[in-house]
Image (spheres, rainbow, N blue to C red):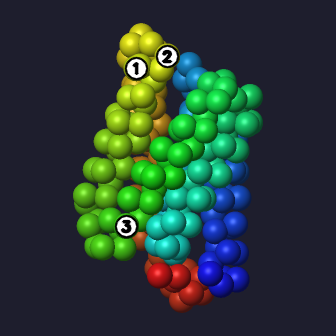
Amino acid sequence: MNVRTMTLTALFAALCAVGGFIKIPSGVGSLALDTIPALLAASFLPPVFVGAASMTGHLASAMYAGFPLGPFHILIAIEMMIILYVFARLHKAGHHSSKWVFFIIANGLLAPLPFYFLVSPAFFIGMVPAIFLATVVNAVVAVVVMPVLSKAAGDRFGLVR
């Protein structure tokens, strides 16, 4: 790992933390625009570092909200890390349409699934619409910004592979 990779990872993790301040109203206060920078990081960082940035972003967003789900936020952060890792792998492999479908299904529908069993079916059913909406908002913003940022940054970021 070189200094450039570490610096870009820290930059995108910090942007994820800033995105955590932009909340999406829901029953749980940790839904935010903290995933957009991690999605954008897929253009510039190796998948493992994209996952690390997303994990940091979720934990920061949950911290700002007062950890409404308590220790379950660790599970959510791990889920985010895995989802964004796979997203970045799909991006690097050139699967530009399927990466968005994967992200929306995995983050909006599959990631909340453990809470059906860990909390209650009612909690799961109540949260899925808000989580799905937050996932779609994060994805739509990233879809619009990613090509522009990739073109504008070009070789300035060094496009770490």
- Please indicate whether residue 63 sits to the left or right of residue 124 in the image: right
SS at mark 2 in the image: loop
SS at mark 1 in the image: helix
Residue ID for mark 2: 119
Res. 85 image quadrant? bottom left
Locate residue 38, reporting x and y percent: 54, 58
Which amino acid, by three-letter code, is at mark 3? Arg
Locate residue 18, reporting x and y percent: 70, 51
Dot 1 crowding, Cα within 10 Å, few <14, some 14–19, many 20+: few
CB under 8 Å between callouts 2 and 1?
Answer: yes
Residue ID for mark 1: 116
On-image quarter of the N terminus: bottom right
The relative height of residue 7 versus residue 144 in the rendered view (above or below) is: below
Res. 14 image quadrant? bottom right
Q: Tell me the residue at 53%/38% (across/down).
A: 76
Residue ID for mark 3: 89
SS at mark 3 in the image: helix
